[in-house]
Amino acid sequence: GEDVEQSLFLSVREGDSSVINCTYTDSSSTYLYWYKQEPGAGLQLLTYIFSNMDMKQDQRLTVLLNKKDKHLSLRIADTQTGDSAIYFCAESLAASGTYKYIFGTGTRLKVLA
Amino acid sequence: KAGVTQTPRYLIKTRGQQVTLSCSPISGHRSVSWYQQTPGQGLQFLFEYFSETQRNKGNFPGRFSGRQFSNSRSEMNVSTLELGDSALYLCASSLEPDRTTEAFFGQGTRLTVV
């Protein structure tokens, strides 16, 4: 089956690190993504990782992938109030010659000043 | 460069009516995808269009349909609206339907069915 799960809420203090977790069920996914959605806005692609990678770092963002456990995480270092948003994990699956995307339900990150 | 534009931003319809939503992709982008976002189901893929052809479709009933025009603008239509169709409908555009190409999302159309 195709399913992507995330915890619904996360609250951290400004300056701390945030870790948002995601689990997926389809082992055939080859790309996994993290999107950010701010209030009233669409989704913004933060980063993506190919399934043969274990880790990808991009400035304050670190993505860890455990393919055996089908677990993906996004770590935000030095979390700022501007990071408050909903974060979506997504995977892409090959389908009929193209790709479709399965999104998690999103994790609402609240950063406390 | 203008972003992805979705119109209208807000819409209220009654059950049984039909609705058409519009999405204008970023200039030069040829791939447009539609998503439905609800609190209970999260973000679900509706369909993807590239070069006026539907390339992929999610698990939605036939009441949901779409099309893409030669200028890459896309419309989605929902007929015989149900209360459960109330959602934020997001459109995303990208240069090509490539998984590593960044997809840019519009702000969405919030549809309320009463």
Image (cartoon, coloured by chain):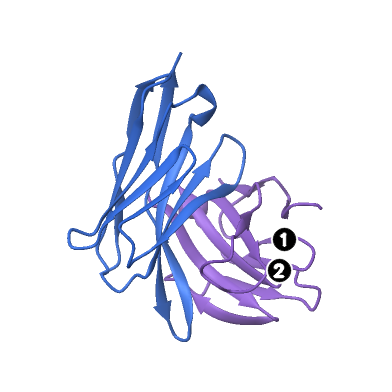
Chain colours: A blue, B purple
Query: Please, is residue A56 above or below residue A68 in the view?
Result: above
Q: CA distance from mark 1 to mark 2?
A: 6 Å
Q: Secondary structure at mark 2?
A: strand
Residue found 51% across the figure and 22% down from its top: A81
Query: Please, is residue A78 above or below residue B98 in the view?
Result: above
- Residue at far top of view: A113
Answer whether residue B83 is visible to the viewer in this image.
no
Q: Position of residue A3 (x, y in %)?
A: 29, 61
Residue found 46% across the figure and 71% down from its top: A100
* Dot label at residue B22: 1
Query: Please, is residue A48 above or below residue A112 in the view?
Result: below
* Dot label at residue B74: 2
Quadrant housing residue B20: bottom right
- Tag 2: residue type? Ser
* Dot label at residue B33: none
CA neighbours of label 2 inside 10 A, class few (<14), some (14 to 19), many (20+): many
- Tag 1: residue type? Ser
Answer whether residue A43 is visible to the viewer in this image.
yes
